[in-house]
Image (cartoon, rainbow, N blue to C red):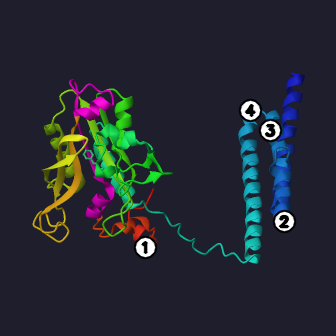
Amino acid sequence: MANYIFCSFALHKTKIAMLTRIKELQQEIEGIVAKSVDEAEELRIKYLSKKGEISKLFEEFRNVSAEQKKEIGQAVNTLKEFALEKINLLKEGLQEEKSAVSGIDLTLPGEPMKLGTRHPISIVKNEILDIFKKLGFVVSEGPEIEDDWHVFSALNFPEEHPARDMQDTFFIQRNPDVLLRTHTSSVQVHDMETMKPPIRTITPGRVFRNEAISYRAHCMFHQVEGLYIDENVSFADLKQTLLYYAKELFGEDAEIRMRPSYFPFTEPSAEVDVSCSICSGKGCNVCKYSGWLEIMGCGMVDPNVLEASGIDSKKYTGYAFGMGVERIAMLKFGINDLRLYFENDVRFLQQFEAAN
Ligand code: PHE
């Protein structure tokens, strides 16, 4: 019994002592001033750091009896919040003073951050890739510096074919076996050498041809080429795939037509035209009043090409197609001069979709 009385008396004393200390600190903090941010920080340490005055109260709080915990707990928390607010206000005031002194007006509106825009070639290239990815094509890329085998020989170019001529191809270091690829079909050769059918790849990349630069020709441009090899692949598969592609890219009303053509690596070969999206086929100066625009070359992979890369041409057939990205971007955006793509004029570039 005696023990109990002593105990409760002691606890009562703790409560009074704590409430008195809280009141003292409250008054003290009310009156604090700081002349510098450093002084304010010292005050924060004095009251609010781990060993600060308020933290000491939290330690003593452990000795408070259960029924008094609520009252004292609230008082200590209120004191802590009061101190935090007071010291933050002091700091803010001091910082504002400091910036006013250094001439910075923090109330001025900020300068908007200028976002870059995506290059029209990238926009169109990504759009083309997305369409073929949906059809199950896998993106494959390869080197821009190539050998004769991958650019020409494996693709069934006869020895005397004019495309091997110095006129068209950039050779490196006078070595006729080291050259800049003139088309991305070279990547398809790498794919056929390393993959097993079914092969379904889509290949974007830069290509180089030794041509005089004008509004309609450049020595460097971008291609996207596709390749599909499997059992029983037919020309009908090719035509249907390209029709789907044209509708996705130019809209539901787009139509395609195929004209016989020649490429060493495909047989039969065709040029593909799409109905002019500018005049809806009625005839305008972009389509030269024909209603059609040429967009790509295509054909069934020549059996010689399959065999050159070790694919059994009796078992497998395939189709391939290839297009210039610059040309498609010209049609999509109404750009009339190829050189604009590579001049880096921001007035031209900033008209396109913002990068995000
Ligand atoms: N490689 C051809 C070119 O550069 C395009 C093409 C690819 C044609 C595949 C037919 C098949 O013009």
Q: Secondary structure at mark 2?
A: loop
Query: Residue 66 — which label?
Result: 4
Measured in 3D between alpha carbons, the distance from the residue under mark 3 to the one under mark 1, in whole angstroms, is 68 Å
Q: Which residue is mark 2?
A: 34
Q: Is mark 4 within 8 Å of ligand 1?
A: no
Which is more foreground, mark 2 or mark 1?
1
- Identify the mark nearer the N-term, 1 or 4: 4
Mark 4–mark 2 distance (CA, rounded to whole Å): 39 Å
Residue 138 in sight? no
Q: Residue furthest left?
A: 282
User: Does label 2 point to a residue whose CB lies under 8 Å from ligand 1?
Assistant: no
Neighbour tally class for label 1: few under 14, some 14-19, many 20 plus, Cα within 10 Å: few
Instruction: Tell me the crowding category of disc 4: few under 14, some 14 to 19, or many 20 or more residues within 10 angstroms, Cα based.
Output: few
Q: Is residue 174 left or right of residue 290?
A: right
Dot placed on the residue nearer the N-terminal end, 2 or 1: 2
Please give the residue where the numbered disc 1 appears in the rendered image: 347
Disc with the residue nearer the chain's start (4 vs 3): 3
Tell me if 136 is positioned left or right of 176 in this view: left
Tag 3 residue: 61
Residue 315 location (% of width, % of height): 22, 23
